[in-house]
Image (spheres, grey):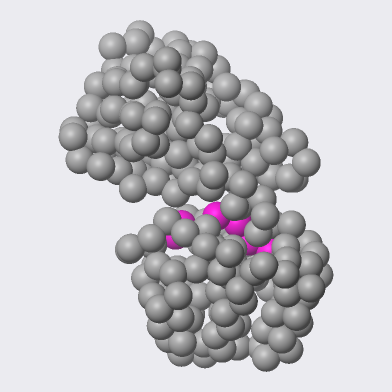
Amino acid sequence: MKILIVDDDRHILDALSVGFQLQWQDATIIAASDGDEGLRAFYEHNPDVVVLDIAMPGKSGFEVLQEIRRTSDVPVIMLTARGEELDQVRGLELGADDYVVKPFGHLALLARIKAVLRRAELPAPIRALPDFVAGDIAVNFQSHQVTLRGVPVKLTPVEYKLLYHLIRNAGRLMPHQALLDYVWGEDYGATTHYLKVFISRLRAKIEPPDGPGYIETERGLGYRFVRPTDVPTTGTRAAPDEEES
């Protein structure tokens, strides 16, 4: 297990490196003190998870995240300043899997890392489950591959898991809390804000502007996956800025 930590605060780098090594002795900790060094370490070591500070001199955490997401869906946890909600939202929208607010304890961060790694290891359904096709979208459950008009769609583990549970319940309303529990776990503490951001990310990848809408919103209740041939119910496909939290 390789963990890349990118932060310009040497105290944080040292504390996390020592803390993680004590709690997770088989982990290899790779430390980088700025964005450029972090990217070099990422390409050189191919880490299993990245802990990435947002506010750094030179290349920011957002820029590093964008570079990583061009080539990899490795789990990324952003470190944000307390109360910087806009930074948290932007990080999630750019492809981060989670964020942790400073100051924090290394045990709390370690728990977050283990949680994103568990979500990244979603087991495939039983072999008897057939592949799913609806309109232009197709899902191979065994390989976790999603294609749109035959072209592979690159989803992060959380995005795939969210789509998986929506598809497994296609045509049925999935309440907010049920999706939160299925995707993040009952004890994780994820909120409907998380759900809103990831639904928006998923829609942007599987619903092209000239194509059908697959994810329907039931305001105040939840979401459902609909096939293009399904008759619309009282739900709507809300625009991103009209989504509720």
Which x, y percent locates residue 157?
Answer: 48, 46
Q: Is residue 103 above or below residue 176?
A: below
The N terminus: image quadrant: bottom right
Q: How many marks?
A: 0
The C terminus: image quadrant: top right
Q: Quadrant of residue 208?
A: top left
Residue at x 40%, y 29% (from the top left corner)? 141
Residue 99 in the magenta stretch? The answer is yes
Q: Which of the pair 98/209 is nearer the observer? A: 98
Residue at x 38%, y 75% (from the top left corner)? 43
Residue at x 47%, y 42% (from the top left corner)? 159
Q: Is residue 34 visible?
A: yes
Q: Is residue 5 above or below residue 231?
A: below
Which x, y percent locates residue 23?
Answer: 78, 67
Left or right of residue 107, residue 94 in this image = left
Which x, y percent locates residue 120?
Answer: 53, 47
Left or right of residue 164, residue 79 in this image = right
Q: Which residues are magenta?
A: 94-101
Q: Which of the pair 66/6 is nearer the observer? A: 6
Residue at x 73%, y 45% (from the top left corner)? 188
